[in-house]
């Protein structure tokens, strides 16, 4: 598995299968989530507001979140697992990736 191999970005690795994919994210960019955190995520073409309304009608309390990759809706399932439903924006993802790469590049390379 090589980070960014399938998606062109280096903040996660993606394992593809016929019915979906599994993404393993770089813990360094997890924004407050401890290493080993497991969250289940789905991408949708449907508006997040529509999905949120359906979740509220079913008794859940979804939260809309602005992310580095676009927007997501988060809710907790009955087992306590955080579920994300994501609205991916490839332009936002690429800007975020460039900013992360800038943070990882030392201002003064070693040996100088």
Image (cartoon, rainbow, N blue to C red):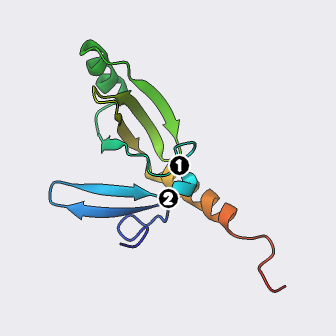
Mark number for residue 18?
none
Where is residue 56? Give x, y as percent: 31, 15
Residue 71 vs residue 80, the one in the foreground: 80
Q: Which residue is rendered at x = 50% and y = 51% of the image?
A: 35
Where is residue 10? Give x, y as percent: 49, 65
Residue 50 vs residue 60, the one in the foreground: 60
Which residue is identified by label 2?
26
Where is residue 39? Give x, y as percent: 37, 42
Residue 30 vs residue 8, the one in the foreground: 30
Where is residue 44? Give x, y as percent: 29, 40
For the C terminus, the image quarter is bottom right
Q: Mark 2 Cα within 10 Å, few/some/many (few <14, many 20+)?
A: few
Are discs 2 and 1 less than 8 Å apart at CB?
yes
**Which SS class for mark 2?**
loop
**Which SS class for mark 1?**
loop
Location of residue 5 with respect to 27 vertically, above or below: below
Q: Mark 1 Cα within 10 Å, few/some/many (few <14, many 20+)?
A: few
Left of 108 or right of it: where is 103? left
Left of 47 or right of it: where is 101? right
Dividing the picture into quadrants, the one containing residue 16 is bottom left
User: In the displayed image of the protein, which residue is found farthest to the right?
Assistant: 112
Q: Which residue is rendered at x = 61% and y = 59% of the image?
A: 100
Which residue is identified by label 1?
30
User: In the displayed image of the protein, which residue is found farthest to the bottom?
Assistant: 111
Dividing the picture into quadrants, the one containing residue 25 is bottom left
């Amino acid at each position: 598995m090589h980070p960014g191999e399938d998606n062109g970005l280096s903040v996660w690795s993606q394992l593809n299968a016929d019915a979906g994919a599994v993404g393993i994210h770089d813990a360094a960019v997890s924004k407050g989530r401890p290493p080993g955190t497991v969250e289940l995520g789905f991408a949708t073409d449907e508006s997040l507001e529509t999905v949120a309304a359906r979740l509220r009608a079913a008794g859940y309390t979804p939260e809309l979140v602005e992310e580095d990759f676009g927007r997501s809706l988060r809710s907790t399932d009955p087992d306590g697992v955080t579920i994300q439903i994501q609205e991916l924006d490839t332009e936002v993802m690429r800007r975020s990736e460039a900013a992360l790469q800038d943070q990882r590049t030392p201002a003064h390379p070693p040996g100088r």
